[in-house]
Image (cartoon, rainbow, N blue to C red):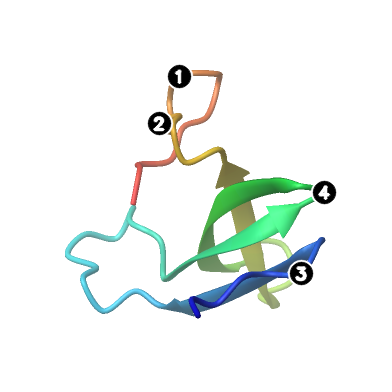
Amino acid sequence: MAFEHKENTATVFANDKKSADNQPDYTGKGKVGDELMEFAMWKRTAKSSGNEYYYMSFKKPSEKFGNKGQSKPAF
């Protein structure tokens, strides 16, 4: 039986295919409500404090980043 996410859970993995700085550091899939979503996550550093944080974006698998105001590449 294939793995199935429970509602409002996700798994992300290191992006071992990253070839440019603008590509996500981590990618994954999960369920938001009953809908399957794709996740992309970037490790960033705050300019003002120098603290590290993660920026995350998600989309429906059938959409591409950039179509609805998103500025991150598809994965």
Numbered label attached to residue 64: 2
Q: Residue flagged by tag 4: what amino acid is it?
A: Gly
Q: Is residue 60 left or right of residue 66?
A: right
Q: Residue flagged by tag 1: what amino acid is it?
A: Asn
Q: How far is disc 2 from disc 4 in space, using C-alphas?
A: 20 Å
Residue corresponding to mark 4: 33
Residue corresponding to mark 1: 67
Which residue is found at the position 64% from the left and 68% from the top?
A: 54
Mark 1 surroundings within 10 Å by alpha-carbon count, few (fewer than 14), some (14 through 19), many (20 or more): few
Q: Nearer the viewer, mark 1 or mark 3?
A: 3
Q: Residue flagged by tag 3: what amino acid is it?
A: Lys
Choose top left, top right, bottom left or bottom right for residue 64: top left
Q: Nearer the viewer, mark 2 or mark 4?
A: 4
Q: How far is disc 1 from disc 2 in space, using C-alphas?
A: 6 Å
Q: Secondary structure at mark 1?
A: loop
Mark 3 surroundings within 10 Å by alpha-carbon count, few (fewer than 14), some (14 through 19), many (20 or more): few
Q: Residue flagged by tag 2: what amino acid is it?
A: Lys
Which residue is found at the position 46% from the left and 32% from the top?
A: 71
Q: How far is disc 3 from disc 4 in space, using C-alphas?
A: 9 Å
Q: Is residue 27 left or right of residue 75?
A: right
Which residue is found at the position 82% from the left and 48% from the top?
A: 33
Residue corresponding to mark 3: 6
